[in-house]
Image (cartoon, rainbow, N blue to C red):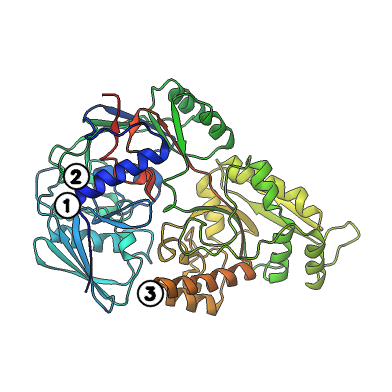
Amino acid sequence: MMKLTLSRRLFGLAGASAMALLLGAGSISAQPKPGGTLVIGTTQAPRHFNGAVQSGVATALPSTQIFASPLRYDDKWNPQPYLAEAWEQSSDGKTITLKLVKNAVFHDGKPITSEDVAFSIMTIKANHPFQTMLGPVQAVETPDAHTAVIKLSQPHPALLLAMSPALMPILPKHVYGVGGDVKVHPANIKPVGSGPFKLTEYKQGEYFTLEKFDKYFRPGLPYLDKIVVRLIPDENNLMIGLERQEINMVPFLSGVRTIDRIEKMKNIITTSKGYEGIGPINWLAFNTKKKPLDDVRVRQAIAYAVNRDFITGKLMGGKPDQVLGPIINTSPFADASLEQYKLDLKKAEKLLDEAGYKKGADGVRFPLQVDFIPGNDEQQRNLAEYLRPQLKKIGIAVEVRAAPDFPTWAQRIASFDFDLTFDLVFNWGDPVIGVARTYLTSNIRKGVIWSNTQQYSNPRVDELLQKAAIETDQAKRKALYVEFQKLVVADAPIYFINSVPYRSAFVSSLGNLPTTIWGPMSPMDELYWQNR
């Protein structure tokens, strides 16, 4: 058996010091003083607070404060104890045993047991939109109140990462196991968790308040008394609040002008750390079953005609990192040697000629329509508008099709009613969780957004993804993903552009900033005010 454990107290103090020193957040006292209120501002309004049945940053921000999970992660991709103080993995990789802390209770005072862990894992497997995340889980056995044994049909190296707060909140079975469908359960709005904070007030569309849970199982934590999350849809008002320090923290900022603005603010710390696990990639997707895009040469030609350097350097002000393939640069599985499709209009025209698409008398080879996600001009609309004059240079007439709202765009793309579309998709830490869904032939599912809507199919890619999903040797697993990335980039079902330049902004008097791989989507139990 392979065993990994770590003292919770050691993790708390060491992790706190490293993060604050790295970000220049001020000196670290030997013992941070408890108390105070943190005001977070965000444009992301949650539909509800239950991350077991809902993905996305809007839900994850509060859910990770309200619910605890088996594990948490540091900024080096290392799992750390949380509700599970220790865990063991069998030599065949088909069994993971969790040893739970014995002092954890839910916000209603009921103790957390292995029955709650088993209920939560099977609930997530049945209801969470990421179906590959817990796909191999067959059952969870509960030999005693503090031992949960997860049985798998095959090794699942992504499972430990899937035990993170944003992906595996532990629900009280006595609450969510009764009262109807968990996806629409009343407790999704009035949650009962075991995390460092409990929801005490929610005014839809305006704010919600999280107060310190005084029976939290990590001794002496959380430091803060209260977190107030203000929902402010207008980003300019959000920035005014931050500048006046009426707001103390703003996560998930990505606008170039906004980032420039906050970087000039006095007494405000900005950081890109904390988004490595999310892995947000902005890309141009092709409908590979629709002519002329069913020809790989046409897709490659478009890739050679689009200038990634111009997009990231000029249109996006140099803020984002360029991304060359399906796995985000910050992932341990990323391959830096991929084909870059550097701007080469002559090569693009040659490929189109070879594909049999000659220019007509009007200089046009064929028309294409491009879609984009509404509501994000810098990452989406501006790129769609850029594509029109750029592809005209190689004889492609581009029409930009705007959608009135997100559901309209999603319905079009999920129904395969598109030629090209810009899209923004998260890696979610491990390729099994957030990458494979886009490329597996088995995941071509009409009507499901963020599945394989490109209708891309390559048997070797399927084989590599299936092998990598069960490979427990890290080096061998990376080799499989490297080959996968090279094939996908060569087949060009997607032209990869940039990582979304997410930033978090904090007032400088905060210590122990949340900059692990999950950043704002992780417990803020160690965050504290330095000037108390």
Residue corresponding to mark 2: 192
Counting from the top left corner in percent of width and height, residue 263 is at 52, 31
Residue 257, placed above or below residue 376: above
Instruction: Name the residue beneath numbered marker 1.
Output: 172
Q: Which numbered mark, 2 or 3, is in the foreground of this view?
A: 3
Question: Which of the pair 225/209 is nearer the observer?
Answer: 225
Name the amino acid type tagged 2: Val
The residue nearer to you, when weighing 466 against 333, is 333
Label 2 to label 1, Cα distance in Å? 7 Å
Image-based side of 488 in relation to 41, left or right:
right
Contact between labelled residues 3 and 2, with CB atoms less than 8 Å apart: no
Which label sits on residue 492?
A: none
Instruction: Write down the residue under mark 3.
Output: 473
The quarter in which the N terminus is drawn is: bottom left
Residue drawn 47% across and 60% down?
A: 448
- Amino acid type of the residue that numbered disc 1 sits on in the rendered structure: Pro
> Could you tell me which secondary element the residue under label 3 belongs to?
loop
The answer to whether mark 1 and mark 3 are in CB contact below 8 A is no
Q: Are marks 2 and 1 in contact (CB under 8 Å)?
A: yes
Task: Pinpoint residue 11: horizontal percent, then vertical percent.
Answer: 25, 49
Q: Nearer the viewer, residue 380 or 500?
A: 500
Mark 1 or mark 3, which has the lower sequence index?
A: 1
Residue projecting furthest to the right: 361
Residue drawn 66% across and 44% down?
313
Front label number (1 vs 3): 3
Asked where in the image residue 347 lies, by quadrant, the reply is bottom right
Q: Residue 47: in sight, yes or no?
A: no
Marks 2 and 3 sit apart, C-alpha to C-alpha, by 38 Å
N-terminal-most mark, 2 or 3: 2
Quarter of the image where the C terminus is located: top left
